[in-house]
Image (spheres, rainbow, N blue to C red):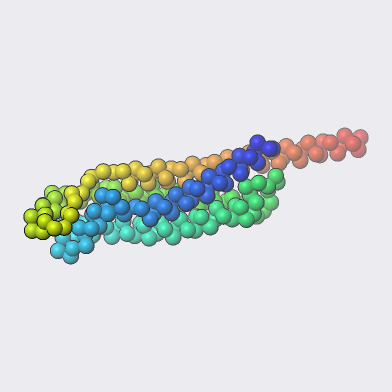
Amino acid sequence: MKTQIKFQKILALVSLIIAALVFVYALIFNSGNLSDIMFYNNWESMRYEYGGSDSFCDPAQTFVSALVIMAIVYICIVAILFITASNKRRNYYITNYVAIGLNIAMSVIVAIFGIIFIAILMAKFYGLDWNALTSLIDALKATDGKQPYKDVSKSPAMFILGIVVFLLVLANAAAWTLNLIWKIKLMKGEKELLASGLVGEVA
């Protein structure tokens, strides 16, 4: 039982870190080369020429807004694990099962939402009219040499990072599920041992 309690303490802490990572990822998603796409999308005359606003930028903003809200809710749900002492309790009660169930459910929701949206946004990103965007950037460089107009990289780094983060979230849900099964078996074993001890004393 001591090993299991130690494991659930570590798991609760890891869960909090993962939830915080989701929040940080939401804040930094539109950075790097994705920030460059947003930069050029600010020109009304440019945004529809390479498909930026309709195809990528608007859905990306929607994704970030939704993920920030989900991450805050996720952090609050993980905090309930500590409030109900689910990270250190020897025996689980109804409140612990509810807290763990909410954590598992939210982890699955965040992971599925994130992975699906990342796949959609990645497809939209590579579906942009890159030739038109390159031509627009070259035209801006030629007409206004004072501004630092940067070429936009096709690096998928931010999407890959997202997949890693959301797979960690999914792994966290699996770990809590296994922990719950482990705890139930240990609690059942303890009850059986106590019952058999009482029977022996009565005999």
**For the point 59% across and 50% down, which residue is it?**
100
Say left or right for 153 vs 160.
left
**For the point 91% across and 38% down, which residue is it?**
202
Say left or right for 6 vs 200.
left
> How far from the left and from the top, in percent, is residue 1?
69, 37
> How far from the left and from the top, in percent, is residue 151?
18, 49
Residue sticking out furthest to the front:
146
Name the one closer to the observer, 63 or 82.
82
Residue sticking out furthest to the right:
203
Asked which quadrant contains residue 191, the reply is top right
Asked which quadrant contains residue 35, the reply is bottom left
Name the one closer to the observer, 58 or 31.
31
Say left or right for 190 vs 102.
right
Asked which quadrant contains residue 46, the reply is bottom left
> How far from the left and from the top, in percent, is residue 149?
17, 54
Name the one closer to the observer, 151 or 195.
151
Q: Is residue 139 visible?
A: no
Total numbered labels placed on residues in the image: 0
